[in-house]
Image (cartoon, rainbow, N blue to C red):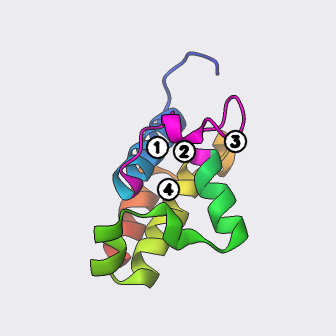
Amino acid sequence: MTCRVSDKANVYSYGVVLLELLSDKKALDPSFSPFRNGFNIVAWACMLLRQGHAKEFFTVGLWDNGPHDDIVDVLHLAVVCTADSPSTRPTMRQVVQRLKEL
């Protein structure tokens, strides 16, 4: 929003890339158009988690082959990385540590 690069902006970008990898969708995928203008992959992930439909976020192959608890934890981590407030986003060191734990 400020057009300045920072560690927290990098964490946000990492979270978006992680969401794209988990879902095989683009950040502004055309499939989001039925929702509303400005709807994006972050809003979609948050919506599905809120509704208890995390399974719908993942590619079929990933959901079928991955341990469900772990991939849902990675989804939660990606959502935390894309939090609106930069002060609530983790550091990359914390992200790496969490990924190692998973």
| Secondary structure at numbered mark 4 | helix
Q: In which quarter of the image is the N terminus?
A: top right
Per the image, the residue denoted by label 2 is 41
**Other residues around mark 3 within 10 Å, as few (<14) / some (14–19) / many (≥20):** few
Which stretch appears magenta?
Answer: 23-42
Where in the figure is residue 99, as x and y percent of width and height? 36, 68
Q: Quadrant of the C terminus?
A: bottom left
Where in the figure is residue 93, as x and y percent of width and height? 40, 55
- Mark 2 or 1, which is nearer the eye? 2
Per the image, the residue denoted by label 3 is 35
Q: Mark 2 or mark 4, which is nearer the start of the sequence?
A: 2
Which label number is shown at residue 16?
1
**Other residues around mark 4 within 10 Å, as few (<14) / some (14–19) / many (≥20):** many
Q: Distance between the residues labelled 3 and 1?
A: 19 Å
Q: Mark 1 or mark 2, which is nearer the start of the sequence?
A: 1
In front here: 30 or 14?
Answer: 30
- Contact check, label 1 and label 4, Cβ < 8 Å: yes
- Residue type for callout 4: Ala
Residue pushed farthest front? 34
Residue at screen point 42% across, 50% down: 92
Horizontal side of residue 77 vs 2, given as left or right? left
**Other residues around mark 1 within 10 Å, as few (<14) / some (14–19) / many (≥20):** many
| Secondary structure at numbered mark 3 | loop
- Residue type for callout 3: Phe
Per the image, the residue denoted by label 4 is 78
Where in the figure is residue 51, as x and y percent of width and height? 71, 69
| Secondary structure at numbered mark 2 | helix
- Residue type for callout 1: Val
